[in-house]
Image (cartoon, coloured by chain):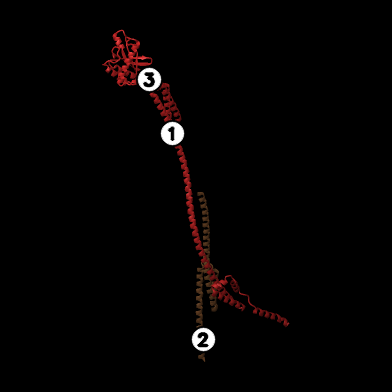
Amino acid sequence: VRAAHSFPIALAVAAGMTWGCATPPRPRELDAYDVLKRSANVQEAAKRSPDLVATSDKLGTKATEEWQSNDLEESRRDALMAQIKLKTALALLEQEQLKKKIDAMNSDQAKAEEEFGLASKELAHETESLTLLQKYLEARQAAEVEKQRLSQQMTSEQQKAQAEQLRLSQQLETEKKIAAAQLALRTAETVDAAKYAKAEYSAASDMLAKAHAELKENDYPGAQASAEVARQSADKAAELSKPQYEQAEQTSQNKARDEALSRDASGISGVSVRIERRGDLQRLVLAVPDLFSKKSTGITAGHDAVLDAVAGLVNKYPSYPVQVIGHTDNKGKSGELVALSAARAQSVFSALVSRGVEARRLLVSGLGGDEPITDNRSTAGRAKNNRVEIVFLYH
Amino acid sequence: MRRRWQRAAGVLAVAAALLAGARAGEEDDLQRQIETQRSGASDLERLDDIKATTDEIALLRSWLDEAWALRSKHEYDQVREVLDRCLAQAELVRQKIAAAKLRAQAQRREVALRELRAKIARTQKSLEDTVIKKKALEGSAQ
């Protein structure tokens, strides 16, 4: 029984001895230190802060030894201190790393800013180029639009100008035609078309007035057509009138000239003047008597004044053909009388030629006694019939 | 005999007085150290404007409280140990604050750099677009 009672006591003593000699639980500060010690940057921290890390190591070792020596409180304090030292070393390492990083980033920042500056500058340059290009293109587009507008305007102006030119051309052409018609009408008037081609002249006048009216209304085709008709009518009127007019004019002129000739001839003393018609010809006959004695062919003296006057008259009217015709009375043979009269005419012809009359104008002939102007039965009558006549012929 | 006892008692009294004075001086010195460190902890709190070491400072304060309590118990050797640890902790806090500030600075730099790189990328993209547009315009201009 004594043994049974002593066994639990012995077991308790043995357990107490075993518990008292065993290693106590590791302090959590020491565990934390160990964990910290295993962190990646410890080696780097030792290089950066060798004293701190060495102190930490020393404290850590001491703390371990204190734990193993069962001096837990001391172990905990030293482990804490070891942690602090190591953490301080790590913080210093981190600072250094961060400083390097910041320096690197500063360098990167500077480079990036430089890069940004260059890119910005280039962008600004390109943007400016682009802006200029856009402005250029806009300006070009605007110029193109303006060009088209001007082109259209110019085309419009050209069309207007062409239309105006055409209008002016038509107007000019019309005015020309009207002027031509007016000229034709004036021409027709010069031949008295109003008198000799009344219908045509009236038509021409009317058409010309119509052309003027149409011109005023800018109806150029109508005016041109009217002017053309007016011109044709005027031409026709002129054509129709011309012969009549010319004939009338000639007649008028001839008449005046004949009258002048007659007056001048009547003014010559020693000659008798008569006008007679043979067929369609008029004859102004100047009978010069007493130029010859008996059967003589030579002009007796004292007739120069008469001959001069006659020659002057012939020369004054150069357009008249002139006959110099000798006449005798009826005393003698017909052939002889003709020869005598011709010789006497020839004498007068010569006298006139000698006074400046053109020989080719004078036709010399002798008619003998075939054309007495009075009765041959008396001496006075025969003397009158012995004569040389200067005959002016005209229509 | 009586005089010998009296002299001995006087020596003991002086010794006791001297010891008591030395202890009082040490206590005051430790108190000043604790207060100085508490003030330093407050300075560290102000310095840590980004609140990166809140836990470490809290730990520091708790150790300073512990030191104060030990001082009150006149455990001066332990107080010195704790104060040494507090000094080390304060240094750790300073370095951690410095590291945290550098980290923040690095982060700001990173952000700035990232933004700058983004700006560069945008600028380069704009540049490419501009060049393409310009070439297209040049093509149409001819």
**Chain in brown in the render:** B
* Residue A25 against residue A333 in the figure, above or below: below
As drawn, the label of residue A248 is: 3
Q: Amino acid at mark 3?
A: Ala
Q: Which residue is mark 1?
A: A169
Please provide percent x and percent y for residue A4. 72, 81
- Observer-side mark, 2 or 1, equals 1
Please state if B36 lies on the left or on the right of A324 as rendered.
right
Secondary structure at numbered mark 1: helix
Please give the chain letter of the residue carrying mark 1.
A
- On the image, numbered disc 2 is attached to which residue? B12
Circle 3 SS class:
helix
| Chain shown in red | A
Instruction: Determine whether A227 is above or below A20 in the image.
Output: above
For this rendering, which residue is in front, A81 or A377? A377
Where is residue A263 shown, x and y percent of the image? Answer: 30, 17
Q: Is residue A307 above or below residue A33?
A: above
Asked whether the residues under marks 2 and 1 belong to the same chain, the reply is no
Badge 2 vs badge 1, beta-carbon distance below 8 Å = no
Q: Quadrant of residue A291?
A: top left
- Tag 3 and tag 2, C-beta contact below 8 Å: no
In the picture provided, is A14 more to the left or to the right than A365? right
